[in-house]
Amino acid sequence: MCSDALRHPKSAALYGRYGLGGWAQDLGKGCVGTVLNHNGSVNGYGSLMYSTPDGKTTMTASLTSGDAAVDAAKEFPKALNNLLKRVFCDGKTAN
């Protein structure tokens, strides 16, 4: 489990704050609070894992991309945010 002492103080990204191979992200008001996550990818494929620190709620997801009219890099952050809100914020989606 990542604690504040283990996270790099200047890290910030789409996935939260980084420390020891994992990320910690505060989902904000109305959600479960902080979730821990990790991701990985190779050309055309990505995977994600999110969990509450106690492991009570978890989510795994994958993304396959390739030659398509939709730019996955452009649409992915919005889709990820909506998925996180559905799983960790009582089913509410982001605006």
Image (cartoon, rainbow, N blue to C red):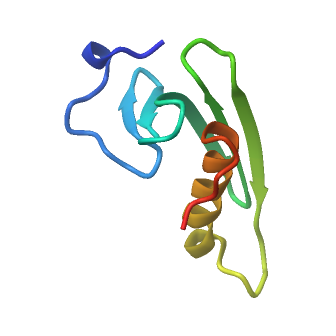
Locate the C terminus by quadrant.
Answer: bottom right
The residue at the far bottom in this view is 69
Q: Left or right: 68 with respect to 27?
A: right
In the rendering, at what x and y percent does residue 64 appear?
79, 60
Measured as percent of width and height from the top left, residue 83 is found at 68, 52
Please indicate, yes or no, whether residue 48 appears anywhere in the rendered image: no
Quarter of the image where one finds residue 20: top left
**Residue placed furthest toward the left:** 10
Does residue 76 sit above or below 53 in this rendering? below
Q: Quadrant of residue 79?
A: bottom right
The foreground one among 6 and 95 is: 95
Residue 58, given in percent of the width and then of the height, sits at 70, 27
From this viewpoint, is residue 66 visible?
yes
Q: Residue at x 57, y 33 (%)?
A: 38
Q: Residue at x 69, y 48 (%)?
A: 86
Residue at horizontal 62%, vertical 46%? 84
